[in-house]
Amino acid sequence: MFARKIALKNLICLGMALLLSIGLFAGCGNNGGSSDPTSSKPAASTASPSSQSELGAPANDPDNPWSHIDLSEPETINFYVIGSLGTDWERITGLANEKMQEKINTTVNFVYVPWSDFQTKYALFLAGDESVDMIYAAPWCNYQEHLKANAFTPLDWDFISTYMPLTAEGQASESWKEVTYDGKIYGIPRDDALIVADIAVTTRDLMDKYGWKESDINGWDDLNQYLFDIAAGESGTGVYGINAQGGWPSDIYWFRYANRIFDIDDGSATWMTWRYDTGKSFDVNDMIWFAETPEYLEFALLMAEFNKSGVFPADVMSNQTMIDDSYLEGRSAINFASVENANKLISEMESRGKEIVFLDGVFTEEHRSRRGPYMMYAACFPTASKKTERAAVALDCMKFDKEVNRLLLGGIEGEHYTLDETANIRDLGPNAAAYPWAGWCFLLQHDADPALKLQPDLQATQDRIMDSLVSPDVFPINGFAYDNSKFEAEIAVLSALVNEYRFSFCFGIFQDNTEAKYHQFISECKAAGLDAIVADYREQLQAFIKD
Amino acid sequence: MKCKKGLTNDVLIFNSVGFLLVLIFGLMCAIPFYLIFISSFASEGSLIRNGFRFIPDEFSLEGYQWVFRNPMRVLYAYRNTICVTVVGTACSIFLCTVTGYVLSRKDFPWRNGFSLFFFFTTLFNGGLVPWYILCTRYLGFKNSYIALILPLMFSVWNMVIAKNYMKSIPFDIAESAKVDGANDLLIYFKLILPLCKPLIATLGLFSALAYWNDWYNSMLFITDSDKQSLQYFLHEMLSTVQALKQLASAGNQEAITNAVIPQDSMRMAMTCVTIGPIIFLYPLIQKYFVKGLTIGAVKG
Amino acid sequence: MPIKTGRLRKFLYDVMKNKLLLLMLVPAVVYVVIFSYIPMSGIIMAFKKFNYTDGIFGSPWNGLDNFRFLYISGKLWTLTRNTMLYNIAFIMVGLVLQVGFAVIINELRLRRFKRVMQSFMFLPYFISWVVVVTVVRVVFGYENGVLTQLLDAAGLARLNIYVDPRPWPFLLVLMNAWKSTGYGMIVYLAAVSGIDPGMYEAAEIDGANIWTRTFRITIPSLLPTIIIMVLLAVGQIFRGDFGMFYQLIGNNGVLLEVGDIIDLYVYRSMASSSNIGMASATGLYQSVLCFITITATNWLVKRFEPDYSLF
């Protein structure tokens, strides 16, 4: 039975190993038995790992792609993850482990790191804990810094094609560039590029009260006017145009979206931006530090107007209630949400007797989103771990084995989600709250995953967003990692300055003093060495693009 | 009110002024707590719509329901915290008073040297990483109750208070006992300690509070949700919102998508749940802070 | 060398004489060596460029590079001064309130009132700063706050404390006092209860009124405790209460003009990075300053009253 299965597997493994070694001796330099012409190995793109392994892709055994690896010893891998678990988490991971036990004789021990702790504990896990075999990594978790501090094991293409054959085939080829540093691969990115595209929402009753219709709002100026109307009319009632929490990034919307400004770095603290104008290609010299753009001062002044007119509450910076909650309770006239979240909001608003209104028109024709990095989440293998090979196999299984992957991503079909295979659309199942889709396993997602079923008008918005994505050819910076070793201290000082002023500008706290404060901010930054950093940044970016 | 000593004018004025001051400050402390207490019974919707009021518009038990949604975990957390607090406080009192006693002895030649030796550790600190490495790699603190008890067991602050208090006990007591042939340990246990009831009450309270409020050690060392302390369990919920806010401002929109965000009434409920048990400890020790409790015994 | 042997002999004699006392010290000494002195070796990280494979001891040295971010901003003096001044204000105000209330409560005759009020005063200690922010909004909120209602009733202009830095030094001292008086009072209550009532009786017989009794007996008896508590607080004088400042002031640029302290600045500069060396460097900077201060203060106390010093 089970024992026989294992014995049989061992026999097959032995056989395969023999065959492969014969192949190896027989033909160094050719691709052995690997001929799979449809594989999307990144041999074509220049910047990715170029050396094809002599071992080639493993023998084509569709039932067991890992048959060439010695999996006779059962192993337990500790995988540190972050996210929001549902109540069914233990059950689902238990089921996944059963499957993985069958397929690769491995048990994955998922260790959950709460959102509240990761900042303190991430470095500690890497420094002190020897039993971390695999851990999530992300730019906002200082992936670059940890990488340079030798926290993660460097891999090469040999390793990946041997121990992660499915990933080597299935992973989007442009994603490898983003995790490569100095010729080595430091992590396995997820197979899904982040697209951040929000839409503005408001409520029907407020629009009616002030005589607005969706068709009236055709741009940011209209939206601003709407907000001013609300502020004037609702003064003193506790309803505000934007009733946000103290750390809400209004600069994402009124500074970046409104002016088609793209960030160059994702998560690292240098805030270089570029203004996208249709038709123009990216040039390093057009890259500007965010606050030095003329648009930033305009934005700051506008926010000051908002503050003075009461669009923001007066004590907004100490507000702890999230804008999402305020919006649901009718205390905030507008909110921004991703298309998926907006879909969720429809029913939530209905249950409160309100009608949600989508302000598509704010994001005009010229508004663009772009494919962000695959590197938003990656799995890395700490250097202190001794089970890297097995961890890699486990990750391969979790990412690309259909059964295990779906189980971990969504739970049980029919219970947590429903799936329309042909249209590749999913919807919430009866017990969806117990296991939200991709609540914690962000790095196991794929572009090809079924998308959430959206209401028709939202679907139209989503389609429009996808159609208008800026091509990476125009803006080829994904994966660029600025090496800050020359300017560490200066960047720390800049970071302190930016964090000091940023939210004050975002909420217009300085009111009439905004312009003076803006100039003060710029001069303090320059005194801290801003110009040298920008010049260095441009140099490095130019070298990266040339590659 | 007994009037055996005549109520002279000065005493009257002093008492009245004192009464007023204490009353004002006490109310300043109690009224915000009342606000928190009553808001823990308010519905989330009413808190968002109307803010925090002294009489909420809508009552609801949502906050408590959320805190207790996994009742076994809360019970375990209570159990853990209570056990750790009791054991830890006992050990801590002993350790701090013994050390304080030795350093308070005027005839101990190296008392200043040792005082500096202990106090120095409050000035310089190697940081979290070395401490963590020491505890997990070399001391094996992972996931055990030791990890919750040991780090807080000896507090230099408490030791200094003990040393200072014991200095006020006249030295002749110890000397006369020595003449009678008692050794230092015996003196400590039989003579000095019984005179230190206010001190023990103080240290006991401080230690108990330190253990009760400790979430940091749970965060660092405990991965098993059954062994977590109460404060950590609550802290995790509270701090999650802050972490998510920071991530959202860093552009990580996904952080918000699927996360279930705790609510204001829940935060209030959490505060009440933590304060609840320990506030009953304070009145118990108050009876030790009575005039003349110790010296009377000395004279006797 | 007769002198040296003499000293050695005296040393050994002292050890033998006090052997039991020394033994009683052993548990605490072992504890402190393991949990404080061994990890203290991590201070060298302030001078190193840390990487995970080499660990603390193997990482390469980089001199004073980790300290640069502190002084190139030009703000170091302001931050240090702010941290120190706030702490001094907290210590002084705290001292007056804690000793004052301890003395008053000790003298008051209404037992139940005393007990209830003591418990009340203790409550704020349990309220985390996150929740305190909410309380502050209720009291000082611009739209519906208690203060606003009072000002409106009195016909005065409203005050928006979130865009006006001027009230904040007082507010911070007030809130710190509110939160920690109940807790800090306990030590003084314990000390006061240890004062010999016979002294009071004698003083009364001599005709002293209550003010004299308080200022001539109670306060002087409390003096050793007061000095010790102040010294303990001075030992942390360059370390700010991060929790309090971050929740109340946080990233509000207007308030940071008056309320920026070292700990807040470091938090802002390391918000998007995890440079262990730089964090260590800040800790070392604060430690050295605290060490210098407490040594000087302790020495001063020793000159006047050797018995009251900390070490």
Image (cartoon, rainbow, N blue to C red):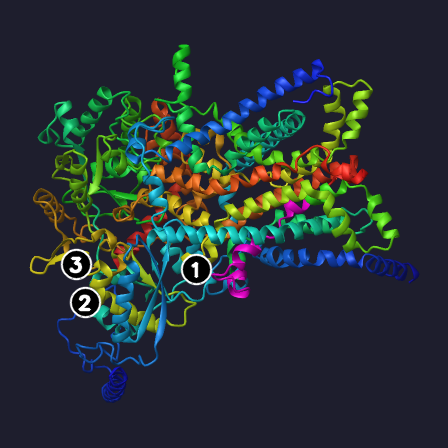
Q: Are marks 3 and 2 in contact (CB under 8 Å)?
A: no
Q: Mark 3 or mark 1, which is nearer the start of the sequence?
A: 1
Question: Residue B261 location in percent, x, y?
Answer: 31, 44
Q: Which residue is denoted by mark 2 in the rendering? A: A402
Residue A408 lies left or right of residue B276; in this view the side is: left
Which is the main secondary structure of the residues drawn in magenta? helix
Task: Check residue A125 in the rendering and tell me which mark sits there, or answer none.
Answer: 1
Task: Tell me the mark number nearer the camera, choosing from 2 and 1.
Answer: 2
Give the secondary structure at mark 3: loop
**Residue farthest to the top, as pictured:** C155
Q: Amino acid at mark 2?
A: Lys
Instruction: Give the residue drawn at x 66%, y 52%.
Output: B94
In which quadrant of the rendered image does the C terminus of chain A lie? bottom left
Query: Residue A408: which quarter of the image?
Result: bottom left
Residue B90 lies left or right of residue A228; in this view the side is: right
Q: Magenta segment range?
A: B134-161
Do circles 1 and 3 both sit on a common chain?
yes
Q: Mark 1 or mark 2, which is nearer the start of the sequence?
A: 1
Q: Residues within 10 Å of mark 2 (few under 14, many from 20)?
A: few
**Camera-side residue of A291 and A153:** A153
Q: Residues within 10 Å of mark 3 (few under 14, many from 20)?
A: some
Q: Amino acid at mark 3?
A: Asp
Against A523, residue A95 (above or below) is: below
Query: Residue A491: which quarter of the image?
Result: top left
**Camera-side residue of B234 and A377:** B234
Q: Which residue is denoted by mark 3 in the rendering? A: A449
